């Protein structure tokens, strides 16, 4: 059994794989709950990607007690695509994993890309859009504050603006302070996605990119994305599994 961990800024995600079969996927709010979960599970291999060194050390120390092989994915790992990025050492490994997972899916489905880009959109603490070129190069993307991050920032940086409930978003023109805040945050996020897709279509002879969506805040925004998308909750961890197998 392979344990995979995506150690993020906010949550920690885990998945257990038995060969190619996904046995279990969990989202953990903190390190302590993750450790309690790991103590209840049996696994013989472990792979992780991390953007939080502090959490990473605690969890790796915990897993190391079992004296099993632990793989850490990084920019220098063998991948199924090539990195074409000016500052690769600053590239978040979660972004790479999502791109690897999406590219693996496309290749296994024998989808001929021609002029198509592959996009992965991850709605987490940050909203990231990651682009893979038709020739299989990770070429970069966009990083913006996540939906909840924007709401929290407005609340902390102003004297009177509240944090509204995300599921109360009702449409473009807000008729109260709460709904106006939500409109601003949702429209900014949706607009970024639409602009990215439209400009990539111009770059690829009018062909819309293949779009994969993941991340904890995706549920609040999926309805408003007016493009063909594939929602994959476990995209980063499936990509991590691909990287692990390539380097095993």
Image (spheres, rainbow, N blue to C red):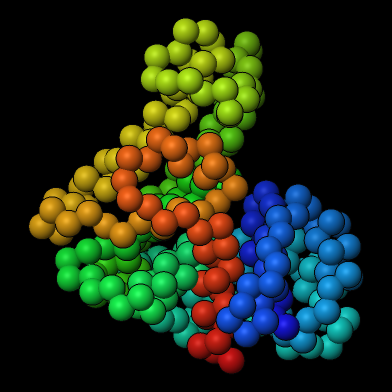
Q: Please provide percent x and percent y for residue 205.
A: 10, 57
Question: Is 81 rendered above or below residue 120?
Answer: below
Q: Please provide percent x and percent y for residue 27.
A: 71, 55
Q: Please provide percent x and percent y for residue 93.
A: 53, 67
- Is residue 192 visible in the rendered structure shown here? no
Residue at point 62%, 29% (across, down): 152
Q: Quadrant of the N terminus?
A: bottom right
Does residue 118 appear left or right of residue 34 in this picture? left
Q: Quadrant of the C terminus?
A: bottom right
Q: How many marks?
A: 0
Does residue 194 appear left or right of residue 31 in this picture? left
Question: Is 244 rendered above or below residue 185?
Answer: below
In which quadrant of the rendered view does residue 69 lie? Answer: bottom right
Residue at point 62%, 85% (across, down): 19
Residue at point 26%, 62% (across, down): 117
Taking depth in this image into account, of 90 and 79 the one nearest to the observer is 79
Q: Furthest-top residue in view?
A: 175
Q: Please provide percent x and percent y for residue 81.
A: 37, 78
- Is residue 177 visible in the rendered structure shown here? yes
In which quadrant of the rendered view does residue 67 lie? Answer: bottom right
Taking depth in this image into account, of 14 and 85 the one nearest to the observer is 14
Residue at point 58%, 36% (across, down): 149
Q: Furthest-bottom residue in view?
A: 248
Question: Is 239 rendered above or below residue 140?
Answer: below
């Amino acid at each position: 059994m392979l344990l995979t961990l995506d150690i993020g800024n906010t949550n920690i995600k885990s998945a257990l794989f038995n060969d190619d079969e996904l046995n279990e996927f969990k989202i953990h709010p903190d390190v302590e709950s993750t450790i309690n979960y790991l103590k209840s599970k049996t696994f013989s291999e472990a792979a992780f990607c991390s953007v939080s060194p502090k959490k990473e050390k605690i969890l790796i120390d915990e897993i190391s007690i079992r004296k099993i092989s632990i793989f850490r994915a990084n920019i220098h790992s063998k991948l199924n695509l090539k990195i074409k990025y000016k500052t690769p050492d600053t590239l978040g490994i979660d972004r790479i994993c999502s791109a690897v997972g999406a590219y693996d899916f496309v290749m296994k489905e024998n989808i001929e890309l021609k002029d198509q880009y592959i996009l992965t959109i991850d709605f987490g603490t940050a909203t990231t859009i990651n682009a893979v070129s038709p020739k299989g190069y990770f070429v970069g993307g966009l990083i913006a504050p996540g939906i909840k991050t924007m709401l929290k920032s407005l609340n902390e940086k102003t004297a009177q603006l509240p944090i509204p409930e995300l599921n109360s978003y009702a449409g473009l023109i807000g008729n109260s302070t709460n709904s106006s805040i939500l409109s601003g945050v949702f429209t900014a996020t949706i607009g970024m996605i639409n602009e990215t897709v439209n400009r990539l279509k111009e770059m690829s002879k009018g062909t819309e990119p293949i779009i994969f969506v993941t991340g904890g805040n995706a549920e609040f925004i999926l309805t408003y994305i007016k493009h063909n998308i594939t929602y994959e909750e476990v995209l980063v961890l499936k990509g991590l599994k691909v990287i692990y197998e390539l380097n095993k």
